[in-house]
Amino acid sequence: MRSAPDRLRTSTGMEGSLLVGMLMGLVTGAVAIGTAHLVAGLVNPGASPIVTVGQASIDATPEWLKGWAIRSFGSRDKLVLLSGIGAVLVLIALGLGIASVRRLWVGFVGLGMFGALGVVAALTRPAAEPIDALPALVGAVTAGATLLALHRRAFPTLRSAAPEPGGGAPPDLDRRRFLLAGAAGGVAAVFAGGLGNLLGHRFRADASRAEVVIPAPSSPATSTAGVELSVPGLGPYLTPNDRFYRVDTALLVPGVVAEDWRLRVHGMVDHEIALGYEQLLARPLIERDITLACVSNPVGGEYVGNARWIGAPLKDLLEEAGVLPGADQIVTRSADGFTAGTPTAVAMDGRDAMLAVAMNGEPLPLDHGFPVRMIVPGLYGYVSATKWLVDIELTTFDAFDPYWIERGWAERAPIKTMSRIDTPSPSAPLRAGRVPVAGVAWAQHRGVDRVELRIDEEAWIRAELATTDTIDTWRQWVVMWDAAPGDHTLQVRATDGNGETQTPERADPFPNGATGYHTVVVRVT
């Protein structure tokens, strides 16, 4: 006969049932996610329900909300989304667990619905395979078995999951058996999820990247003497990899292994080309400093960076394939199915468009496209800088709308002339006297010819510019300001190599990039 602490009777049964229901839901949900993640690690890490449902959420998010998330959270937007999904799943698991105490069928129906949602999300992803439905199916079935086992151990005397007529007292609870079963389920969920991570391709990709040796480029970058101004608060000329902005649609960074990587060039070409990673590295490589910018970058924003890239010239590869007349769009696809469309004429006009394999002296970081990404100077990233590149198709703009074009962004997206004040910042305390005002300006593939600073609506002051590296990189600038006490408004503008000055008209990033002068208000004491 069980002791009193082991069996809660009707005096505390309602409270006990509520707590057991909550724990039952949490353990069941953890087992579902852990098991699904384990199976995804075996078949396709990108088919994990958390990833597929999250990606579907990203795709379905209105553009204004996506833009707000990118501006507000930057590269942390994926973490925020995953945290939100996790919070919703916890609440749903709690609710289903509580409902399952008296009506077990409610839990089974809820798990079935979420399993079906996971299956649909997996099978509707780009390049989905039928096996991608397996993680969600196995997760749902395992979760159902877990729920049943926990329920039977919690309520061994219960013969029916239906409520008693008139809403009788809750069933007796067997706390000891339930806690043991719940602990076992929790351990199994953690073990399955951890093993799924170990099996995931990212760990293999990390190891693969560590083994890569990038050959010396046949055409190295030119000297960068004089391109960097020594001004406190001004960012470096070359942006370190760990500080380079990341904006993409990949909820889970694709773990592409270099040894398995293949690139297909096809479509409107004379003949198809297929390349492996070693074949790409064996081609003549170029090294160039190129500034990339995201179309979502607000005025004065940080979604722009300059790096030294090594890669194989894109034009050479396309000429080998033989681009057919009329093929005015290059559609590139990433390993996770993302698509971008680049004007063929731009990629072939002699600029240093490349299939990049290295960034700032090391193989591409996984977050920035390892093993291969595309770069076309002068175009915003959403039409030119596909990461985790696996496919190049020559086609037409009339025949295909890539990912962001389907969502209303501009079809052709040259980077606009822009400038930014890095120092002083609005929050920095300033003393009256000689103060450096400095920042960067960019107009990729046109170059920056002039930068001017205006203080309190007075005449524009021409800034001192660092040496030009190439027309595809940003330029640092500085103005020495005799700051007087009081509040002051600083504005900056740039003029590109074609003689066109950036517009003062304010515009949001959607649909083809933000415009306006970066304005900073400072207080001098």
Image (spheres, helix red, strand yellow):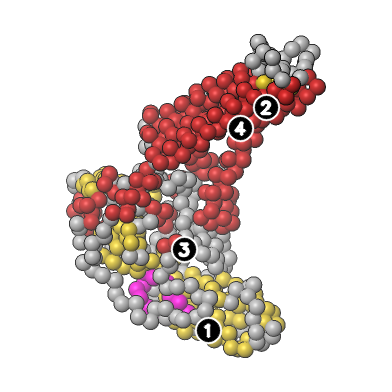
Q: Residues within 10 Å of mark 1 (few under 14, many from 20)?
A: some
Q: Residues within 10 Å of mark 4 (few under 14, many from 20)?
A: many
Query: Along the line of sight, which residue is nearer the eye, 35 or 222?
Result: 35
**Residue 506: x percent and y percent?**
58, 65
> Which disc number belongs to residue 479?
1
Which residue range is magenta in the image?
467-477
Q: Quick check: 314 left or right of 49?
A: left
Amino acid type, mark 3: Arg
- Numbered-mark total: 4
Label 2, label 1: how far apart the Cα atoms are: 67 Å
Residue 474 magenta-highlighted: yes
Q: Which residue is mark 2?
A: 20
Query: Along the line of sight, which residue is nearer the eye, 250 or 60?
Result: 250
The reply to whether the C-beta atoms of the residues labelled 2 and 3 are less than 8 Å apart is no
Label 3 vs 4, first from the N-terminus: 4
**Residue 107: x percent and y percent?**
61, 23
**Residue 23: x percent and y percent?**
64, 30
| Residue drawn 48% across the image and 45% down it | 251
Label 1 vs 4, first from the N-terminus: 4
Residue 331, can we see it?
no
> Which disc number belongs to residue 341?
none
Label 3, label 1: how far apart the Cα atoms are: 26 Å
Q: Which residue is mark 3?
A: 243
Query: Along the line of sight, which residue is nearer the eye, 234 or 419?
Result: 234
| Residue drawn 78% across the image and 19% down it | 10
**Residue 302: x percent and y percent?**
51, 64
